[in-house]
Amino acid sequence: MDLFNIESIDTVIQLIATLICVIISVMRALATKKRAWVMLFFTAFIYFLGDLYWQIFVVVHGHIPEYSYIPYLSWYASYLFFILLLVEVRGERDKRKKSPVLWPVPAFTVGMAVLYMQKQDYIGNIICLILMTVLIWQAVSGLLDKSEKKKRLLYLAVLLFCFEEYAMWTSSFFIAEESIRNPYYWADIAMSLTFVFMPAALSKAVDR
Amino acid sequence: MNYIENVFICLAAPLLIAVFWMKDKARRMMIFLIVGMGACLLSSYISTFLAAVQGADYLYASLEISPLVEESIKLFPVLFYLLIFEPEAKDAANASIMTAIGFATFENVCFLMVNGADSILHLLIRGFGTGTAHVVCALFISIGTYRLWDKEWLRNVGTLALLAVAITYHGIFNILVSGSGAVAVIGYFIPIFTIIFTRIFRKKLLAERS
């Protein structure tokens, strides 16, 4: 297998980006002892490990993993840590009042999951549906909360991450081409940049 | 046939006798050591079964199925201890590490039975590498128990998320050691470097939550 194809280059860029996020967050976690930084560390670290598993498999065995349970599991766990991160940084909210702006969130995620299920992988799509719904819900709730202004950048970064994930899934649903013209790779590289930006957003939310 | 059940009985028998003469923490730790060995035996059955169902050969089973099964089975005794006995964070973390040590010990015994014990250098690297990999995976969960999860729901969700970290780490280790030459040596040394790193920052990592 050619290791200098667009997929490998894309994975290496993402490995570097997530590693930067891992290093910054572990240093901040050790310095500040804030749990939010530990959560960001695990978010980036598990995403990094999933990419690393994939790339090492390709390098050692010359093809992509046959079953790929492990990298997908690690990416799902990364979404879970993002949720835990948002739960950690958010303030006390009135649970009884739900803004009507939030209701399109599950409508969007369910709609997209139904689309992706046309290509089967029902369990994986249901897991993504649940995790993404909670994640986007938490991020939008945070943006709507006027008392959490300094955390806005973090919520925006998380929403950007979710948007990029959906852009990747949708483009890979319609286009299977492995070339730079495929929007999948642009969305993936944009997501790598979001990981680099994430420590700055969290720092603004919890350190100052 | 390598009769691993018989080997398990042979290894576990003196430890079981010792359990009756020990008290408190020492007894608890010995029980988790035996449970870890039992978890290794059980996960070998489950991995073999899943590999047969999936039609996977030995290599793919060891790279893609066994990390998932081994780490999950290894976690069950600790989860049982956490949920039923509600121990202190320190005791739960120690239980997790003892289970991992029992698991790694029995796995090494099985490796010796299949591959022989003639190359001391290879066995040294393998013994320390595999043993440390299992302990590192247990450490991920221990650190979470120690300092991250102060609420019941957070502990359950967080432990599941950390299980995924342990599974992926274990999967990477298995891919590297399945290679040859420098790749395998790097694979065996990664857990050793990880454990040295965690040892250096031990105090900070294991600072119990307030």
Image (cartoon, rainbow, N blue to C red):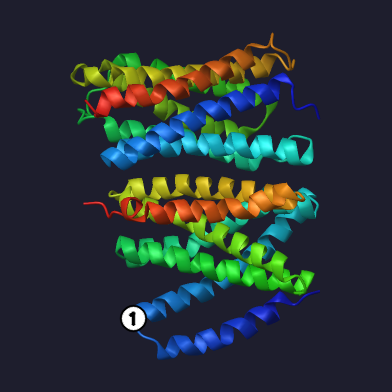
| In this view, B80 is above or below B210 | below
Name the residue nearer the viewer: B151 or A36. A36
> How far across and how far down the image is residue B88, in percent?
29, 64
> How far across and how far down the image is residue B115, in percent?
78, 69
Residue at (46%, 27%) from the top-left corner? A132
Residue at (48%, 58%) from the top-left corner? B138
Q: Is residue B124 left or right of residue A81?
A: right
Residue at (37%, 17%) from the top-left corner? A156
Name the residue nearer the viewer: B210 or B78. B210
Q: Is residue A75 left or right of residue B5?
A: left
Residue A35, quarter of picture: top left
Q: Residue furthest top?
A: A181
Q: Amino acid at mark 1?
A: Asp
Residue under label 1: B24
Give the crowd class for mark 1: few <14, some 14-19, many >=20 residues within 10 Å. few
Residue B8, quarter of picture: bottom right
Residue A81 seen in the current view: no
Q: Quadrant of the N terminus of chain A?
A: top right
Q: Is residue B59 left or right of residue B98?
A: right
| In this view, A64 is above or below B17 | above
What chain is tagged by disc 1? Answer: B
Q: Secondary structure at mark 1?
A: helix
